[in-house]
């Protein structure tokens, strides 16, 4: 028989190969939605992504991008392959970890194992690692360029190294393994901080190894020490060392008059000197623990040093340079993730709390004339004491969040939530909905890929399900098989290996429920967050692998025939990963999916040359960054993200030329948009001012004119604005003579555009928008300004009546059409953009999977709403053939069989009737009404019908649109009689 080590290595590399092939076959060929576009762009050119960054991921991503061999369209694929490889290596180390834990359950050395024990142990490792290979959340991260796949790899290799260290008897060699672990932890910081949560459990493992007679008290102390180490790394080393370095920097530069950087360098010298002295001292005095601790610190810092990439690359002002961490001031903000704000963890206000007092917080510095100068202070908010509580979970005072808290907990408006309400929200929503639901997705199956979908009911009658659930590729049922193995492995460890039982359960809790408590999620998230908790699912999969050993143990006792025993064990073991692979393949296969990038190109191609494009969220910004930075597509368009436009570093970047895009016309000086300056300009109404010239007001602002300033309670002078009615100048003669201006709108031109701001305060980002618009108007409206059609209404600054829809974006025009509350359509430009300049790869291919939570939202809605408005305007203009052409074209490139018809499709039925295509209208109506009727039947059969209120309303709305359109048409009633009867039946049910 081959020796165990060789067999173990072969089986490990075999599961690695299975994972590698699986993920390679299903990997996304380009940038996915969310952060992936940003990470790929930053990897390709070593730029600086959102804080706290992922420098090691970027360095490795850059190496993988070189494999594209100059083909920029393949760069994203190769950076995605970094996640593929990281995930496959995770599976490799997971297998070896299960084998090491399983060996301790058998309580024999590897050399003493019998052949049946060897095969059972290796088979357990294979099954546990394959279950994790095909699990929902891990597979999702494995095929895209996000940091979570590599973070999982570091978790896997650190846990494996810790159990491998436990096997080493020679103390000197064992200490070298500890240094290796410290180095890995340091490297993992350059990917993601999730890896750090395993440290308290590893401290217990260390205690069990080094203590001959371990006790519960000793284990608790070891865990506490591990928590302290975690806190030191997370708060003391990562942001702490740079913070201390800045204190030295302040003293050396401001007090001693030395050059910038001298204090930080001196501090670095002191740290190195202290470590060297400490190591020499530990050798001289024989202090082994001190020696290991200091060397671990050194190796951790070597790994952590990857963050110097952000410092170095930021100094070159790359196009993507978030927080501009090119100096120690901004580097500190970058590491501390200050732009995201803070959430109270242990004690703080609830959503009903009001601010009682503003206090002066930490000083905010700027570098001026070679010195660090305090120019403002961070505000500290003092809340009502009776509106604060321990472990505040219902903390957000966002109006949307407040409404959801009240709805979820049944609290009347204005009433303070009790501590019981607070805990109820934590257990039902944060732990239940935002964690346990994800856990069941991975080991029981999920209902669908729609936002907030619950775990599947394995015994539900699927014949009654509505089409959007029954045909949903993400509807996966594992029939409890992985979960049963998890419970069996849990029982095995509990009964036969108490130490590893405690270690694994602590790792599971720390990477799961403890993270839930730490993250303190609000009542709604923009996307599902299951990828955060894959660490806890990792340890569940380890238990699942050990569950195979428990089955093998029982079979040994009750089955005499070895052949029958191995056959049964193979069936019981392989059934779980095989059914997971079969169920999950279709909704994790992203091969040939390109529309997220095509969506970005369509948005850019909706803009005229040299445009300024205001965008909002991640999905209408990061894909655009990718196509510009990597593929060099439409680099003449300046993408301006409104979420970042309120930050001084981003405004600075907007004032520089990038590729073919000229700087934004911003005249404010750096001192006028620094952090804490003009963050919010308060409304101070003057009834004598009916309409304020925007250029004149901004001129006063540039001069810090006291006429627009007011004094705060603290005595500071701040800028205000006296009127929310603004006017932008227009030169009608000059505009009418320009080549770009559509002549049909000449009658609407006047000497100015007047409008009213939607809000009573102007935030810094809005101030910059107004500055850009005003300066561009003064320059004769020569540069096109666009607003993405995906923005929420309040981000259009109340200018919709002056906005022309040209595709996926509105162009700000130098005139106003009163009553055009949602803008107006330029049919000539929009039809040309839609038919000739937009990309639709694969949207008509049923084999390609489109995630319902992503693609049935903004991408499909933007396309169908845009085409509906275009066709509607064409009909109003009498151009029926062109209206039919654009409607038919959209249905060809985005058919119902791939992207199901939505409410805008229902609205399009009426348009088809208006252009005389009765056949197409009836076909679409038949599909939508029968689909919705079946869905309503299902919703009324459910016990919790209230949870489907919104779905019922949408279904009823679509059916009503269609039936009303037919009634208003000249179509023979007999042709839609069946559809009307279906609708009336559901109306009776709803009203009854």
Image (tube, helix red, strand yellow):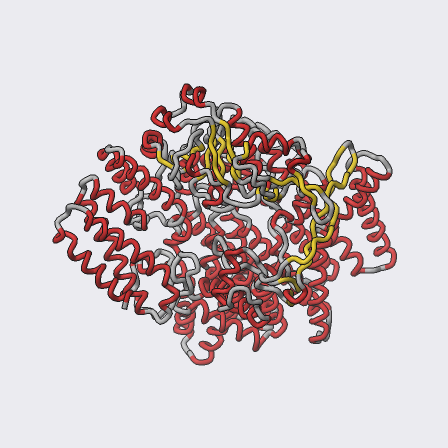
Residue 544 pos. (x, y %): 49, 67
Residue at 12 percent of width and 53 percent of height: 974
Residue 323 pos. (x, y %): 63, 41
Horizontal relation, residue 831 to residue 116: left or right: left
Q: Residue furthest front?
A: 688
State the image quarter where residue 305 is shown: top right
Residue 841 pos. (x, y %): 35, 39
Q: Nearer the viewer, residue 432 or 510?
A: 432
Residue at 37 percent of width and 46 percent of height: 861
State the image quarter where residue 104 is shown: bottom right
Is residue 60 in sight in this rendering?
no
Q: Nearer the viewer, residue 367 or 336?
A: 367
In this figure, what is the number of numbered marks? 0
Q: Nearer the viewer, residue 544 or 13?
A: 544
Residue 331 pos. (x, y %): 69, 42
Q: Residue furthest bottom?
A: 558
Is residue 382 in sight in this rendering?
yes
Residue at 42 percent of width and 30 percent of height: 815
Horizontal relation, residue 579 to residue 203: left or right: left
Say if 298 sits above or below 719 in the image: below
Q: Nearer the viewer, residue 49 or 77?
A: 49
Quadrant where the C terminus is found in the figure = bottom left
């Amino acid at each position: 028989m081959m020796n165990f080590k060789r067999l173990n290595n072969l089986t490990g590399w075999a599961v690695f190969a299975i994972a590698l092939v699986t993920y390679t076959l299903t990997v996304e060929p380009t940038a996915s939605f969310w952060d992936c576009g940003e990470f790929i762009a930053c990897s390709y050119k070593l730029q600086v992504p959102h804080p706290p960054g992922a420098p090691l991921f970027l360095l490795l991503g850059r190496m993988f991008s070189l494999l594209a061999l100059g083909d920029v369209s393949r760069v994203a694929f190769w950076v995605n392959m970094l996640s593929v490889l990281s995930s496959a290596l995770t599976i490799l180390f997971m297998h070896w970890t299960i084998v090491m834990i399983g060996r301790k359950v058998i309580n024999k050395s590897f050399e003493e194992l019998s052949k049946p024990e060897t095969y059972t142990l290796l088979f357990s490792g294979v099954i546990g690692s394959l279950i994790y290979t095909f699990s929902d959340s891990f597979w999702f991260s494995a095929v895209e360029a996000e940091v979570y796949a590599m973070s999982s790899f570091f978790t896997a290799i650190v846990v494996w190294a810790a159990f491998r260290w436990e096997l080493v008897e020679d103390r000197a060699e064992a200490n070298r393994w500890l240094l290796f672990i410290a180095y890995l932890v340091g490297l993992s910081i350059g990917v993601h901080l999730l890896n750090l949560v395993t440290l308290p459990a590893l401290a217990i493992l260390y205690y069990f190894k080094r203590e001959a007679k371990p006790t519960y008290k000793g284990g608790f102390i070891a865990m506490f020490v591990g928590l302290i180490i975690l806190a030191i790394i997370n708060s003391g080393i990562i942001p702490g060392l740079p913070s201390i370095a800045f204190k030295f920097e302040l003293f050396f530069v401001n007090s001693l008059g030395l050059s910038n950087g001298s204090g930080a360098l001196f501090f670095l010298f002191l740290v190195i000197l202290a470590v060297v002295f400490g190591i020499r001292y530990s050798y001289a005095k024989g202090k082994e623990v001190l020696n290991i601790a200091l060397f671990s610190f050194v190796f951790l810092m070597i790994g952590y040093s990857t963050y110097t990439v952000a410092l170095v690359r930021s100094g070159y002002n790359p196009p993507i340079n978030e927080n501009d961490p090119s100096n120690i001031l901004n580097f500190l903000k970058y590491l501390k993730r200050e732009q995201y704000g803070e959430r109270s963890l242990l004690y703080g206000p609830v959503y009903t709390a009001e601010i009682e007092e503003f206090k002066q917080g930490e000083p905010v510095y700027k570098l001026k004339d070679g010195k660090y100068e305090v120019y403002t202070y961070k505000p500290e908010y003092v809340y009502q004491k009776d509106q604060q509580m321990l472990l505040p979970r219902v903390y957000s005072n966002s109006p949307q969040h407040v409404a959801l808290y009240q709805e979820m907990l049944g609290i009347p408006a204005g009433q303070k939530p009790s501590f019981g309400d607070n805990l109820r929200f934590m257990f039902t929503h944060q732990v239940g909905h935002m964690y346990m639901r994800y856990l069941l997705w991975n080991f029981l199956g999920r209902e669908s890929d729609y936002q907030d979908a619950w775990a599947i009911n394995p015994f539900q009658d699927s014949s009654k399900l509505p089409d959007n659930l029954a045909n949903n590729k993400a509807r996966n049922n594992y029939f409890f098989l992985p979960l049963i193995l998890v419970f069996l492995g849990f029982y095995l460890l509990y009964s036969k290996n108490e130490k590893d039982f405690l270690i694994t359960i602590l790792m599971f809790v720390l990477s799961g429920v403890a993270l839930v408590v730490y993250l303190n999620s609000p009542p709604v998230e923009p996307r599902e967050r299951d990828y955060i908790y894959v660490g806890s699912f990792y340890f569940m999969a380890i238990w699942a692998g050990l569950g195979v050993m428990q089955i093998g143990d029982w079979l040994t006792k009750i089955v005499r025939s070895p052949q029958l025993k191995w056959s049964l064990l193979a069936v019981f073991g392989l059934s779980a990963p095989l059914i997971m692979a079969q169920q999950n393949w279709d909704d994790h296969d992203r091969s040939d999916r390109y529309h997220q990038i095509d969506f970005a190109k369509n948005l850019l191609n909706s803009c005229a040359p040299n445009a300024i494009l205001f965008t909002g969220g991640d999905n209408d910004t990061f894909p655009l960054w990718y196509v510009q930075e990597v593929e060099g597509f439409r680099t003449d368009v300046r993408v301006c993200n409104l979420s970042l436009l309120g930050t001084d570093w981003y405004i600075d970047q907007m004032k520089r030329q990038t590729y073919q895009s000229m700087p934004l016309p911003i005249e404010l000086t750096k001192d006028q948009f620094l952090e804490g300056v003009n963050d919010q300009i308060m409304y101070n109404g003057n009834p004598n001012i009916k309409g304020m010239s925007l250029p004149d007001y901004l001129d006063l602002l540039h001069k810090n004119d006291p006429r627009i300033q007011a004094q705060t309670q603290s005595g500071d002078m701040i800028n205000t604005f006296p009127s929310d009615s603004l006017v932008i100048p227009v030169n009608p003669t000059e505009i009418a003579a320009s080549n770009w201006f559509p002549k049909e709108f000449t009658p609407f031109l006047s000497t100015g555009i007047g409008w009213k701001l939607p809000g009573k305060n102007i935030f810094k980002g809005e101030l910059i928008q107004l500055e850009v618009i005003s300066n561009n108007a003064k320059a004769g409206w020569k540069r096109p300004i666009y607003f993405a059609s995906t923005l929420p209404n309040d981000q259009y600054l109340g200018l919709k009546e002056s906005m022309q829809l040209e595709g996926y974006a509105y162009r700000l025009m130098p005139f106003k059409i009163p009553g055009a509350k949602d803008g107006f359509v330029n049919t000539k430009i929009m039809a040309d953009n839609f038919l000739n300049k937009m990309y639709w790869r694969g949207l008509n291919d049923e084999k390609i999977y489109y995630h319902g939570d992503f693609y049935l939202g903004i991408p499909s809605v933007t396309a169908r709403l845009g085409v509906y408005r275009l066709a509607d305007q064409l009909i109003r203009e009498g151009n029926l053939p062109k209206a039919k052409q654009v409607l038919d074209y959209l249905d060809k490139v985005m058919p119902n069989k791939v992207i199901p018809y939505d409410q805008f499709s229902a609205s399009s039925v009426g348009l088809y009737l208006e252009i005389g295509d009765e056949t197409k209208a009836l076909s679409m109506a038949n599909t939508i009404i029968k689909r919705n009727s079946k869905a309503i039947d299902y919703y009324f059969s459910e016990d919790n019908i209230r949870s489907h209120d919104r779905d019922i309303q949408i279904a009823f709305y679509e059916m009503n649109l269609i039936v009303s359109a037919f009634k208003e048409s000249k179509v023979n009633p007999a042709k839609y009689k069946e559809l009307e009867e279906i609708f009336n039946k559901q109306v009776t049910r709803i009203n009854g």
